[in-house]
Amino acid sequence: MAKEYRKLIGRSVIGNKNLRSTEAVAEFICRHGIYGDLKIITEDGKTLIKTNQIYVTDCTDEEYLTELNKILLPMQKITEETADLESYNYTPEGEEPEMGM
């Protein structure tokens, strides 16, 4: 059984959000990930998940990732079909877009 996290914090270029369920994490990744890479951190500030847009590139809890993918993968498929990911390169006002990673 995957560890339950009481609260996670999603951080993205368009804002931060408290996440209290696996479903909320998957939704955050798909909604905010189209604008750029994001992180999901634990209450104590440790990075749990890093993404490249809507795709998870790193997760420190493999069991959690297995449970998340059951919800996330179907959402990613819908997002891929409905969003032109390359057209969303959001840059907050007054900042230059990052070149490469």
Image (spheres, rainbow, N blue to C red):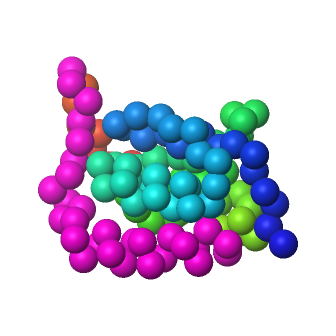
Examine the rendered structure and indicate whether residue 56 appears above or below residue 31. Answer: below
- Magenta: main secondary structure equals helix
* Quadrant holding the N terminus: bottom right
Start and end of the magenta stretch? 66-94
Examine the rendered structure and indicate whether residue 52 appears above or below residue 91. Answer: below
Examine the rendering and report whether any part of residue 52 can be seen: no
Residue 46 position in % (x across, y down): 71, 40
Q: Is residue 29 left or right of residue 67?
A: left
Q: How many marks?
A: 0
Q: Is residue 11 left or right of residue 22?
A: left
Residue 16 falls within the magenta-colored stretch: no
Q: Identify the residue at the far left of this view.
A: 87
Q: Identify the residue at the far top of this view.
A: 94
Q: Quadrant of residue 59?
A: bottom right
Q: Is residue 59 left or right of residue 85?
A: right
Residue 86 falls within the magenta-colored stretch: yes
Q: Residue at x 21, y 21 (%)?
A: 94
Residue 97 position in % (x across, y down): 24, 37
Q: Residue at x 23, y 42 (%)?
A: 90
Examine the rendering and report whether any part of residue 5 can be seen: yes
Q: Is residue 99 left or right of residue 57?
A: left
Q: Residue at x 40, y 34 (%)?
A: 15
Q: Residue at x 51, y 38 (%)?
A: 17
Residue 71 position in % (x across, y down): 54, 73
Q: Quadrant of residue 64?
A: bottom right
Residue 68 position in % (x across, y down): 61, 68
